Image (spheres, rainbow, N blue to C red):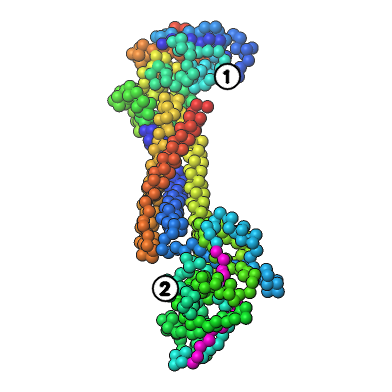
């Protein structure tokens, strides 16, 4: 009888509306949260995908700096400030050659005769992304190994050679070609044999071993001319968002995909947080909606509830029906949300596992779902009992 | 159980309005077991109020009410087994049938069987209306349903608020017989309010409000 009486007080459309909005909110929140934890190792831990932790910075070249070239160099204060940044683990300077360099070759079957001015730079070996046994220098051997950016080769093969009708060169071919280097300064000069021993994807410069450049700068270089225009930085955590902020504030430019990745991570996280907040709003709205709807039902049927209380039904017994209804609907919605979010997870996990070397994280949706069920059911039951008590015992 | 009223006065009435009352502002008004009381007054003198105070559905009074010398903050627990009440406005559920309305109360204590309820419905000449929705009944029919419902529980006091206001003499006779039997069976007391003299019960005490 009581059931029949109370069933008539419900508004089915409002209950369906609540169930659907809660389902949508819960599904989105479970998917975004689990997705975040699933891809967290890809974003924050150093996996094979993003293993580099270093980048090269220089100052942005503006119209004023083309006039006053001094402004492209880093001052000592700026270098100290950089070193003091918490996200920086280590910094190294680019050493530049301060003497004159020429590369030349006599005409052979495979190489035409050429003569060109060159520049050299060096960085510590540990930052070089080329592994070769030939990367060493010894004063007794008149040989200088050189590393050039892979971009240079691409520029030649796909740009210069194409337009000038010259043959294209493979990496292997180039590393076979020997040519001569003449270095001069301080009224003396010396000739060396040289070869390109590797191609760098990371450093955009013509590199020689640091040991050679230090020696040659002393022997042939102009004194006090070693100014620093580029710095190699090693980060503690390349995804730290303060990195971009710091470099933008100081007008430094970074030529590294790493920082692009940092930007990407920032936007990705922002998007995820945005979706998460939207989901929270949906859930809050659906919960508010159902509480409002229940309150309206209770107010509309105030007399019925009062009469029940007057003939001997306790407020707890009167509340029971509404508690069971709202708890069951919440339970059904969240369980459906759990099933849907796990199906979505399975789908994206198969895609991610295909693309990356990836270990699947622990599934946390069940824990979140359970917490949400406990939280909502507790809140509803407490509020229902309180509101019904307030109506029947004014 | 006995009910004791001590200096009771509705908060909305002034002392002047109730100076001649046998109940209000009296130091000690006692309702004891197995007695029948009639509380008489004209309209607007607080007949319904006094029953509501005793039943605990209104607390708009000054003074004190004791049940077996105990003062309850909430008398709800007395409603299932100690005090039954026929409300003046019936407090029936219009969307339930006659039988369902009575059963709704009876399920709380399972005091009467379905057959006993059936028999009572027939006795008050509502057998043909047993499965009709209460909203389709006349006031007199509703009044009979409300009285039957109040009898479907154990009680030590039966409160009747102008219970026969919509009934003819024949129905009053039938109903008062049923009430008398039930009171006797339960060895209970009766407190009834009325506009004037009521001859259907042998009252032990008549109180003017």
x 55%, y 13%: residue? B63
Q: Which mark is residue B44?
A: 1
Q: Which residues are magenta?
A: A92-107
Q: Is residue B95 above or below residue A364?
A: above
x 43%, y 44%: residue? A372
- Distance of mark 1 from mark 2, alpha carbons? 110 Å
Q: Position of residue A60 (x, y in %)?
A: 63, 68
Q: Is A100 inside the magenta-drawn segment? A: yes
Q: Chain of mark 2?
A: A
What kind of element bears circle 1?
loop
Q: Position of residue A170 (x, y in %)?
A: 43, 83
SS majority, magenta: strand
What kind of element bears circle 2?
loop
Is residue A201 in view? yes
Q: Nearer the viewer, mark 1 or mark 2?
A: 2
Q: In the displayed structure, does residue A94 sit left or right of residue A370?
A: right
- Say which of B207 and B58 sits in front: B58
Residue picked out by circle 2? A132
């Amino acid at each position: 009888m009581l059931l029949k009486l109370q069933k008539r007080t419900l508004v089915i459309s409002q209950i369906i509306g609540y169930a659907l909005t809660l389902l949508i909110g819960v599904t989105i929140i479970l998917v975004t949260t689990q997705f975040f934890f699933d891809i967290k190792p890809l974003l924050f831990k150093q996996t094979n995908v993003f293993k580099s932790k270093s980048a090269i910075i220089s100052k942005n070249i503006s119209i004023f700096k083309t006039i006053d070239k001094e402004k492209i160099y880093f001052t000592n204060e700026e270098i100290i400030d950089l070193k003091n940044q918490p996200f920086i683990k280590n910094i190294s300077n680019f050493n530049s050659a301060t003497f004159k360099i020429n590369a030349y070759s006599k005409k052979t079957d495979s190489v035409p005769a050429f003569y060109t001015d060159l520049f050299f730079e060096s960085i510590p070996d540990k930052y070089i992304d080329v592994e070769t046994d030939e990367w060493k220098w010894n004063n007794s051997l008149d040989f200088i190994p050189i590393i050039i950016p892979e971009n240079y080769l691409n520029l030649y093969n796909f740009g210069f050679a194409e337009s000038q009708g010259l043959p294209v060169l493979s990496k292997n071919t180039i590393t076979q070609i020997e040519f001569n280097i003449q270095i001069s300064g301080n009224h003396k000069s010396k000739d060396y044999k040289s070869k390109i021993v590797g191609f760098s994807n990371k450093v955009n410069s013509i590199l020689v071993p640091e040991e050679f450049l230090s020696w040659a700068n002393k022997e042939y270089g102009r004194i006090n001319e070693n100014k620093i225009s580029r710095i190699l930085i090693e980060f503690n955590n390349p995804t730290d968002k303060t990195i971009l902020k710091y470099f933008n504030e100081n007008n430094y430019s970074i030529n590294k995909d790493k920082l692009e990745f940092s930007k990407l991570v920032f936007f990705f996280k922002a998007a995820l947080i945005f979706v998460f907040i939207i989901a929270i709003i949906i859930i809050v709205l659906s919960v508010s909606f159902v509480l409002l709807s229940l309150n309206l039902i209770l107010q509309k049927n105030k007399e019925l509830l009062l009469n029940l209380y007057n003939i001997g039904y306790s407020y707890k017994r009167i509340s029971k029906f509404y508690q069971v209804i709202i708890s069951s609907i919440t339970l059904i919605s969240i369980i459906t949300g759990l099933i849907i979010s796990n199906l979505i997870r399975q789908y994206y996990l198969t895609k991610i596992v295909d693309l990356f070397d990836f270990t699947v994280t622990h599934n946390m949706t069940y824990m979140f779902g359970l917490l949400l069920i406990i939280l909502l059911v507790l809140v509803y039951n407490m509020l229902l009992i309180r509101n019904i008590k307030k109506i029947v015992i004014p | 159980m006995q009910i004791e009223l001590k200096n009771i006065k509705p908060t909305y009435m002034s002392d002047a309005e109730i100076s001649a009352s046998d109940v209000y502002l009296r130091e000690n008004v006692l309702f004891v077991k197995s007695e029948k009381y009639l509380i008489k007054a004209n309209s607007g003198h607080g007949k319904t109020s006094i029953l509501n105070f005793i039943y605990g559905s209104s607390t708009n009074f000054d003074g004190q009410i004791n049940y077996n010398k105990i003062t309850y903050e909430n008398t709800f627990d007395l409603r299932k087994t100690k005090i039954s009440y026929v409300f003046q406005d019936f407090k029936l559920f219009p969307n339930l049938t006659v039988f369902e309305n009575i059963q709704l109360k009876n399920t709380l204590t399972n005091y009467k069987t379905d057959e006993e309820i059936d028999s009572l419905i027939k006795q008050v000449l509502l057998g043909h209306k047993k499965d009709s929705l209460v909203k389709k009944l006349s006031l007199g029919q509703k009044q009979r349903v409300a009285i039957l419902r109040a009898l479907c529980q154990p009680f030590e006091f039966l409160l009747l608020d102008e219970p026969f206001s919509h009934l003819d003499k024949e129905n009053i006779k039938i109903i008062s017989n049923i009430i008398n039997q039930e009171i006797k069976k339960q060895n209970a007391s009766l407190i009834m309010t009325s506009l004037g003299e009521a001859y259907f019960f042998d009252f032990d005490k008549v109180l003017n409000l």
